Image: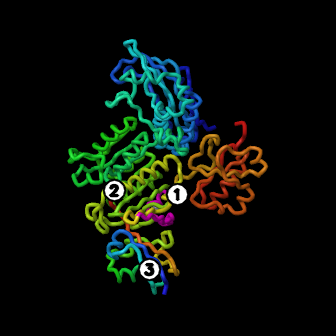
Amino acid sequence: MTSVRIQYYALLREQAGMSRETVQSKSTDAAGLYDELRERHGFTLARSQLRVAIDGEFADWSTALVDGAEVVFIPPVAGG
Amino acid sequence: MTVHSFTFSDQPLDLEQLRGSVEDRSCGGYVSFEGWVRDHNDGRQVARLEYEAFEALAVKEGQRIIEEAAYRFGVTQARCVHRIGLLELGQVAVWVGVSTPHRGEAFAACRYIIDEVKHRVPIWKKEYYVDGDSGWVNCERCASAALDSDSHAAHGHHHADHSQDPAVSALARHPQGLVAPDYSRQQILAEVGPLGQSRIRGARVLVIGAGGLGVPVLSYLAGAGVGTLGVMDGDSLDASNLHRQTLYAITDVGRPKALLAADRLRALNPEVDVRPYVEHAALANLAGIAAGYDVIVDCTDNFSAHFVINDVAVTLAKPAVLASVYQYEGQVQVIDTHSACLRCLWPEGARDGAVGNCAEAGVLGPVPGVLGSLQALEVLKVILGIDSPARGAVIIVDLRTLECRRIAARRAADCPAHCVPCAPSPEPETIELDLRLPVAGWTVVDVRESAEVAAAPLPGASLHLPLGRLLDDPAQLPEGGRYLCVCARGLRALTAAKALRQNGRVAASLAGGYRLDP
Ligand SMILES: [Zn+2]
């Protein structure tokens, strides 16, 4: 199990009902982590509609999770 | 031999001779512009003109404009001559000539030079009217020079005259009258100063979207004295806009926002040339409009517009400041040719409707207010050359928690927007520049040996990397930079530039090298 801190924005924050959480994940990469959380919180956005950032930098979905990583899921935002 | 020069002449211009001076066998196009003395101005019959310049400052600024044009448009030969002294009707007051390999750049560069000269070079014109009266006009820089008492004194004419004569300047014509814009509060900042203020005045900024984000952007940029401000918005004001779009009044509902904004901004600062465009941004219209601006600001509220603006900015190699909001959150991103664009992050684009805009998701007025203010600030940083963490990153602001997060973004190798302009117009291997003037767009790499550097240091900022050490590993210089290699005569610099180019870097060498007594 990997312990990661998650930050949600926009629609994801609304659907998760929280801005952040720390989760114990059995996933090995960012893609698996999102799928896991999507299942848990009922996120409507597909992975292809999002970007993931790990430790302050945009990352590939295949990036391996390491203990203590800070993961941010970012949906595109359009309003103005 | 390359001519890049700005000069004054107190004698009538010899156009044939001037044309000859920019002839170049390597060029396929030549464009020239003549500004003439005409017989009327502002409804008054003009008999003759007198031009006066603060030459030390004016030649420097004029030369800078020529170098900018050369750099931007790849001009081979460029020359501008401005008359001073007494001129009769029909005489040529200013002449610009440019030669370039292809015609498109010649037109663009010629236009750029004359527009910038008009805006930025301190030249004053005295009109002698048929009725015997006379008056100084076009003293565009008086306000910005007000703090700079040295150059002010050197104008050699009395500003008090302006307030007495209702016809003499844009400022005096303003209905509120007689109060000149005062930039002193920003000009006190070390990063602004008189030079920064003249950059702001010379800047041309296109703001797309005159809504929740656009209103603060436009207001602050007009207040700051940005010389040319384009306002593009195809929408008319709706009553539901007013809680966040504070430039407008409830009696304005139903009128086009671009026109409303233009009115308010002109009232805020009559020095600003405000250009409204009552249309939505689309690929078909945007490129043509954006080409005439230096910075693009995306204040739109839908994905299709965001991506159109992104793609046009990347294609035209214009810096752009993007922002968008969602309820209590916002994102800001500054893009330029070297940093990640929207499509580097979202190559597939994004569909409207998937995540909601203000109408669907709701928004509190100050949220776009804050994000728009950030955009205005980022635009000023771009103009003033102040580096920003919003470049090469997305800044995410959560205004409920007041947390701000920077997420670094890299340029994607397969970015669909960057791909085409990525195969850039090949940079020339050698370029001519005057290192005593600020060098825009290049990191100067001094490839001389330490002893040479100590004996004759370069006037501006530079990186010192002797040729031998550079050749050990040219890839030690980071990708994405633009390197101008300099040595004493130009040969070592050319070798260095070639090595850098072979390693995929953008590099050129300074023709002729750097000498103390040029
Ligand atoms: Zn890109």
Magenta span contains residue B361: no
Q: Is residue B23 above or below residue B136?
A: below
Residue B468 sits in which quadrant?
bottom right
Q: Residue visible at 62% across and 53% down?
A: B483
Left or right: B10 as drawn, with respect to B453: left
Image quarter of residue B471: bottom right
Labelled disc at residue A22: 3
- Circle 2 — which element? helix
Q: Earlier in the sequence, mark 2 or mark 1?
A: 1
Whether residue B19 is visible, yes or no, is no
Residue at the disc numbered 2: B366
Residue drawn at x 47%, y 52% is: B317
The amino acid at mark 1 is His
Mark 3 chain: A
**Label 2 vs label 3: CA separation?**
31 Å
Residue wearing tag 1: B338
